[in-house]
Each structure stands twice: as structure tokens, then as C-alpha cells.
């Protein structure tokens, strides 16, 4: 063109900006400054600022803003809106707000830009405040404003506010806009109102790919994976072509359902639709194959990527971690660090999960050190994972140190510490920590109560168990399946077997774990008839017994000498239920025969076992020999048990007690010397009693209790009375 004016230059710069070619737009602007004597107008300046935003060119944008102020365009709505957009997208929301406040006139685009800016910067509550201010002006909200505000409500999980905006949309007739309906569906799905989202979806007169993708993603995010699969099938059946976002969502559902066949079908579509270059899709494929335990395919998808990122590494490491393949997970983590990728929270959580499952303290400490260096050791997710791994490695004190250092704690962190104490046998500490939890603002959930009820069970503290049961009823958590099972177990362990049965009968949906718990507790209390009747009822109701079920059944038979019935149940394990007997089942049968005085049959049963007998099997025979007084067979059983497990004190103690009962003190001394030479230590016996709602533990020969002198004085008096009536207590050398 021989002659160019402001409109010509403005059109050219605007065109490049609209097509995302920021460099070309700035180059044309530089030519304009050199070749034209005119000052740029508001359209040119706003286009140049948008180009700076695309390129994240802060230096150039600051120069342009200086020019804007000099030229008197600082109050121009178009230039001002472009400046607000630049500052918002470069993370300087405060500067954007200053520009916004200085504008005398604001359009719907201006309001949308600042509202979206605050929402993206994590200040969604300010977005809603700005929307309220906008409603007080003459500016009519458009679909972009509604989308921005609904997104803010989604982030805040502000259901009431979102419903109000939905009503406002209906009043203004904007509900016919497909993009607004899509955002409403997304809002309701993110607020866990999936049925309302589906209703809106079904009522849409016209749908687009975004509509289908939003609904599929909503189902996936709310863990309705089967529904996600159904609607995806419907989408493809109706001829819609899923895009990368759709495929990523459905791959996640396939992984969660371990639906490998469907995942492979989606992969085939991805190849046909040429979507393999999408980074989200690639990571989705890795995650899907890893969750479907097809790690070789996951690794192929990982290795096929031209450029990896932290997400792809995390997906692969998590896959290896889930299957306990620690070497591959660590090798990949090492490769990740060599390529200078900074590990994320998920990386550390995955590695700590493997370490916890293997109870490897040294590895756990190394991962902890790296987490400290990365500055994420006290994050909620990493902190709870560290507490869990230290508890599982029996370093509860270290777990408590991490817990104490955390400035922010959610219920997951509290649960990790409470459960850690319970699993480590420190039930008193578990209950004490619960009292601290009650003084915080965090409400305990069903996982908390399961750990606490288990702690009460371990302490055999009916008082604490009943208190916890009352709190569960108040919070309506007593009907949760895992909680109900824990309560049944607690009452039975605390001796209230009738209470346990009443609670068991009140449970609507009883799974096999619940049945096993009740059968086992009946067996432990010597109620063999009730245990066997419950087993028959379980089979009639169609519940498939497990190996744990038969341990309870065989133990019940053993307690009351039901030899034939017990043997029949043992035979039915494989013939009727396809369960291969394990070592504990063989030990139960030996105990069953031994307690019935059939020692030789028990010995013959051991000799005919298809697997090598473990020490526990021989100890069962040894224990029976003690009851019958068969010294010769007892020595043989003890010798076999010790040869299998030389470090177990139980076999030495049982043999020593048998020898002591026969007055064979020289042989008793030999057993003691053998224990010493093998460096075997007997764990001291202990018992506990609950007095005035407080549980006190007593250890054999321990005199640390503050009332020890009075206790032993009473014990001596009782022993003397027993001897005076002619009943001499059995004294053994190692008890």
C-alpha cells in the first residue's frame, strides 16, 4: 500500500493478535512507530497489550503502559481491559485491580476479565464479591461473566451461590446458551450434585462435544465410573467424535474400574483420531494401563513419549508402586531426577506408599530427606504419608514428631496418627490423641472411629468402647459397614458376646468379614454351637466363606472336642468351597485331635501333610502333649518346632513346663541353657484390668506400679489361703 493510516495499521496488528501471532503483531507495531508520524489509537494499544500477554513479555507491556499514560489512554475502556487481562495472566492481580478501579467506564468484558483473574489466582470469593458489585451497575452480565462466576462457585463448592446464579440465568433468558448450560453442568457435578447435572444435560435441546465431555468428566470426578462408560458409549453410538479431554476422562474411569478391554478400545480410537500427540491423553494412557496392572503396556506408552513431564513420571511410578515393584519405581525416580524434573507431592506419596508396604525404614528416611529438601515434608499429603510409613516401620515416636511439626492438619493426618498408635499396640495413646482431636475444629469420620474402637478392643475396655459407640450413634456413623464390624469385634473381645450378637443381627448388609468376626468371637468364647449354627446360616444366605471363616469354625470345634464335625469341615474346605487349606488350618486340626487326646492321630496327620509343617503346627501338638502328659512325644514335637523356628520362645516354654510338671529339673535347666545359647528371650506375660474407667497393665514380676507393695501383699495372702485349703498352684520355671 502506498498510503497507510491508523485504521490500516490497527487492522494489521489486530489480525496478528487474534491469530495468536504475538511476535508478528509487535514487529508490525515497531514498523508503525518508525514509519508513521501519528500516535497509536486505543485499538492499536489494546491489540499490542494482548500480544504482550500472549508472549508474557512483561518488559514490553510495562513500556506500553507508560506510553498509554502519556497519551492519556489510561482511562480508555478497551486499553484498560487489555491491561487488566495482562496483569491477571501474569499473576499480578493487585495491579490489575488498580487499573480496574481507575476505569470510569466498564464493559461486560472488563468485568469478566477481572472476575476470571481473581478466580484463576485462587481468590474465588473476591470474584463473587465483584459479581455482586457488577449487578449494582447498568452492565448486563453475558455468558462469559456467568461462566466465570459459576467457575468460582465450583472452586468454593458454594452450592447455594451457584443456585442463585442459575436462577439469575433463568430470569435473563441466558439458559438457551449452550456454553452457559455446559458450565452449569460442570458446576453441579463439582458440587457432587450429579443428578441435577444429568437432568440439565438431558434437557439440552442442542449438545456439543463439550457437553458430552463435561458430563463424562462429572461422572468420573464423582467416582460414577460405570455411568461415565455408559454415556461415553452413547456419545460414540450417536456419531460424536470425542476429543482429547473426553478420552482423558474416560481413560481415568477405565483405570479405576480396571476395565482393560474398554481401555484398549479407547486407545484404538485415539490412534484412529490422531490424538496421540496430546500430552493429557498420553498421561491418561499410562495411568489407565498402570491401574489395570498392565505395566508393560504402560511402560510402552511412557517410552513412546517424545517429551516426558512430571505427570507422566508420576503415573508410571505410581503404577510400579501399586504393584510393589520398588526397584522399577526407584529406577524411574532416579531417571526423573537426572533429567532435572522436580518431584511433586504425588511422587513422594507414591514412593512412601511402597516403602510403607515393605516396612523399609532406611528407604523411608531417604525419601523423607528428599521431601524436606523439596520443601513439601509438612504438606498435608506428604505429612500423612510420612506418618503412615513411620508407624508401619514401628517408629511411632518419629511419626508423632512429624505430626507435631505440621501447622495444618486435616482428618486424614489425624487418622494416620490415631491408626498408627492403634496398629503399634499403643492404644492408650490412640485414645488420648482422640481427646485432642475433639478439641480441634475437625470432625472425626468413620476411619477415626474404626481405629479407636479397635484400640478399645485391644485394651478390652468396655467403658471406652461404649462411649465410642454412643458418639457413633450421635454422628450417625454407627451404620457404616466397617464401623459396625469393629463394634461387633469390640463387644465380643470385651466379653459382651450377647451385645455383639445383638449388634450383628441389626446390621442390614453383612459381608463375609462381618460373619467371620462373629464366628471367630463365638469360637474364642467357647460357644461352639452358636459358631457352627452361624456358619450354616452364612452358607444358606449365599455368603461364600473364606479361609478365615474356617479358622473360626475349626477353632470352635477344637474348644469343645467336636472331632468328627471339625474333620468334616476341614475336608469340605476344598471339596465344597474350593479353598486350599493353609498352615493355620492344619494347626487347628492338630489342636482338635490333640485336645481330644488323639495324639498319635495328630502326629500321623502332620506326617501326611502335603506341605512342610511350620513351627505353629508342631507347637499345637506340643501343647496337646502337655495336657495329656505324653513326655516322649512332647520332646519330639518340641525338637521339630525348634528346628523349624529356633528363635520362638513358645516351644521352649511349653517343653519346660511339661518337664517341670514331671519334676525333671535337670532337663528343665538344659532347656533354659539351650534358650540362652540361641539367644531366645521370652516375652514377659502381662494382663490388664479396668478399674474406675482406667485400664492398668501388669507385667510378670514387674513392681513399677505405684501400688505394687499393696498388690503383692494381697497376692501373698491369696496364695496362702489357696495352699491352706489344699490346692497347690502349678509353678513353672519359665512362667
Image (cartoon, rainbow, N blue to C red):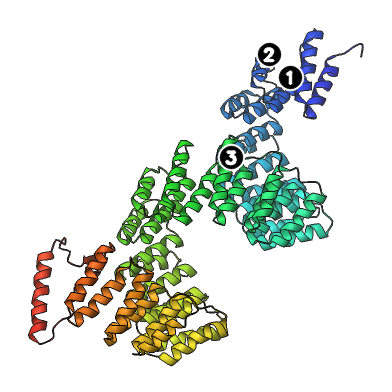
| Residue 412 x/y as whole percent | 46, 53
Marker count (numbered):
3
Figure quadrant of residue 432? bottom left
Q: Is residue 312 left or right of residue 360?
A: right
Placement of 133 over or under 346, stated as above or below: above
Mark drawn on residue 45: 1
Q: Is residue 80 left or right of residue 378?
A: right
Residue at image point 64% right, 50% down? 187
Figure quadrant of residue 589? bottom left
Visible in this render: residue 217? Answer: no
Judged from the image, the secondary structure of the residue bearing numbered disc 3 is: helix
Q: Is residue 562 left or right of residue 261?
A: left
Q: Which residue is mark 3?
A: 336
**Nearer-N-terminus badge (2/1):** 1
Q: Quadrant of the C terminus?
A: bottom left
- Other-residue count near label 3 (Cα within 10 Å), few / some / many at <14 / 14–19 / ≥20: some
Nearest the viewer among 516 and 198 is 516
Label 2, label 1: how far apart the Cα atoms are: 9 Å
Label 3, label 1: how far apart the Cα atoms are: 44 Å
| Tag 2–tag 1 contact (CB < 8 Å) | yes
Label 2, label 3: how far apart the Cα atoms are: 46 Å
Mark drawn on residue 67: 2
Residue at image point 77% right, 16% down? 29
Judged from the image, the secondary structure of the residue bearing numbered disc 2 is: helix
**Nearer-N-terminus badge (2/3):** 2
Amino acid at each position: 500500500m502506498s498510503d497507510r493510516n491508523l485504521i490500516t495499521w490497527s487492522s494489521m496488528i489486530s489480525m496478528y493478535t487474534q491469530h495468536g501471532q504475538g511476535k508478528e503483531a509487535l514487529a508490525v507495531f515497531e514498523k508503525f512507530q518508525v514509519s508513521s508520524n501519528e500516535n497509536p489509537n486505543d485499538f492499536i494499544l489494546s491489540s499490542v497489550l494482548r500480544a504482550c500477554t500472549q508472549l508474557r513479555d512483561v518488559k514490553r507491556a510495562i513500556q506500553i503502559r507508560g506510553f498509554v499514560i502519556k497519551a492519556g489512554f489510561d482511562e480508555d475502556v478497551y486499553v484498560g481491559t487489555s491491561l487488566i487481562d495482562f496483569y491477571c495472566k501474569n499473576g499480578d492481580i493487585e495491579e490489575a485491580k488498580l487499573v480496574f478501579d481507575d476505569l470510569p467506564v466498564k464493559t461486560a468484558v472488563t468485568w469478566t476479565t477481572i472476575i476470571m483473574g481473581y478466580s484463576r489466582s485462587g481468590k474465588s470469593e473476591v470474584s463473587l464479591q465483584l459479581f455482586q458489585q457488577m449487578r449494582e451497575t447498568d452492565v448486563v452480565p453475558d455468558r462469559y461473566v456467568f461462566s466465570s462466576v459459576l467457575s468460582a462457585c465450583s472452586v468454593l463448592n458454594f452450592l447455594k451461590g451457584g443456585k442463585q446464579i442459575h436462577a439469575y440465568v433463568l430470569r435473563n433468558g441466558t439458559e438457551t446458551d449452550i456454553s452457559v448450560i455446559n458450565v452449569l453442568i460442570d458446576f453441579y457435578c463439582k458440587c457432587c450434585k450429579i443428578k441435577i447435572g444429568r437432568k440439565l444435560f438431558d434437557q439440552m435441546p442442542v449438545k456439543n462435544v463439550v457437553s458430552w465431555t463435561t458430563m463424562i468428566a462429572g461422572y468420573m470426578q464423582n467416582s460414577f465410573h460405570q455411568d461415565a462408560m455408559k454415556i461415553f458409549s452413547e456419545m460414540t453410538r450417536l456419531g460424536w467424535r470425542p476429543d482429547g479431554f473426553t478420552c482423558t476422562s474416560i481413560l481415568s474411569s477405565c483405570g479405576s474400574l480396571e476395565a482393560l478391554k474398554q481401555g484398549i478400545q479407547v486407545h484404538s480410537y485415539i490412534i484412529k483420531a490422531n490424538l496421540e500427540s496430546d500430552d493429557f491423553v498420553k498421561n491418561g494412557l499410562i495411568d489407565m494401563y498402570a491401574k489395570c496392572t498392565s505395566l508393560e503396556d504402560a511402560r510402552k506408552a511412557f517410552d513412546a513419549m517424545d517429551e516426558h513431564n512430571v505427570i507422566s513420571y508420576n503415573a508410571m511410578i505410581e503404577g510400579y508402586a501399586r504393584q510393589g515393584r520398588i526397584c522399577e519405581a526407584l529406577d524411574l525416580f532416579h531417571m526423573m531426577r537426572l533429567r532435572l524434573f522436580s518431584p511433586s507431592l504425588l511422587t513422594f506419596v507414591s514412593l512412601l506408599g511402597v516403602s510403607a508396604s515393605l516396612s523399609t525404614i532406611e528407604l523411608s528416611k531417604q525419601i523423607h530427606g528428599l521431601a524436606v529438601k523439596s520443601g513439601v515434608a509438612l504438606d498435608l499429603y506428604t505429612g500423612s504419608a510420612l506418618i503412615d510409613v513411620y508407624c508401619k516401620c514401628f517408629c511411632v515416636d518419629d511419626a508423632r514428631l512429624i505430626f507435631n511439626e505440621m501447622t495444618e492438619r486435616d482428618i486424614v493426618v489425624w487418622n494416620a496418627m490415631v491408626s498408627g498408635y492403634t496398629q503399634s499396640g499403643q492404644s492408650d495413646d490412640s485414645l488420648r490423641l482422640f481427646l485432642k482431636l475433639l478439641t480441634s475444629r475437625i470432625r472425626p469420620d468413620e476411619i477415626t472411629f474404626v481405629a479407636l474402637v479397635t484400640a478399645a478392643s485391644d485394651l478390652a475396655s468396655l467403658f471406652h468402647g461404649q462411649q465410642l459407640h454412643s458418639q457413633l450413634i450421635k454422628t450417625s456413623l454407627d451404620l457404616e459397614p466397617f464401623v459396625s464390624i469393629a463394634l461387633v469385634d469390640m463387644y465380643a473381645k470385651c466379653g459382651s458376646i450377647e451385645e455383639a450378637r445383638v449388634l450383628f443381627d441389626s446390621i442390614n448388609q453383612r459381608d463375609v468379614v462381618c460373619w467371620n468376626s462373629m464366628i471367630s468371637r463365638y469360637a474364642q468364647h467357647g460357644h461352639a454351637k452358636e459358631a457352627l449354627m452361624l456358619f450354616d446360616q452364612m452358607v444358606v444366605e449365599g455368603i461364600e466363606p473364606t479361609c478365615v471363616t474356617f479358622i473360626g469354625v475349626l477353632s470352635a470345634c477344637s474348644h469343645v472336642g467336636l472331632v468328627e464335625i471339625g474333620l468334616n469341615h476341614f475336608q469340605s474346605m476344598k471339596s465344597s468351597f474350593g479353598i486350599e487349606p493353609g498352615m493355620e488350618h492344619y494347626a487347628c486340626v492338630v489342636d482338635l485331635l490333640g485336645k481330644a487326646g488323639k495324639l498319635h492321630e495328630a502326629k500321623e496327620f502332620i506326617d501326611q501333610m502335603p506341605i512342610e509343617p511350620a513351627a505353629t503346627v508342631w507347637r499345637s501338638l506340643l501343647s496337646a502333649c502337655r495336657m495329656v502328659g505324653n513326655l516322649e512325644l512332647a520332646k519330639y514335637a518340641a525338637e521339630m518346632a525348634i528346628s523349624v523356628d529356633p528363635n520362638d520362645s513358645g516351644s521352649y516354654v511349653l517343653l519346660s513346663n511339661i518337664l517341670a510338671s514331671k519334676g525333671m529339673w535337670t532337663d528343665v535347666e538344659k532347656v533354659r541353657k539351650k534358650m540362652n545359647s540361641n539367644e531366645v528371650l521370652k516375652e514377659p506375660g502381662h494382663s490388664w484390668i479396668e478399674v474406675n474407667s482406667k485400664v492398668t497393665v501388669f507385667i510378670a514380676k514387674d513392681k513399677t506400679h505405684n501400688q505394687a507393695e499393696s498388690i503383692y501383699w494381697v497376692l501373698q495372702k491369696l496364695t496362702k489361703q489357696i495352699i491352706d485349703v489344699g490346692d497347690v498352684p502349678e509353678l513353672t520355671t519359665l512362667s
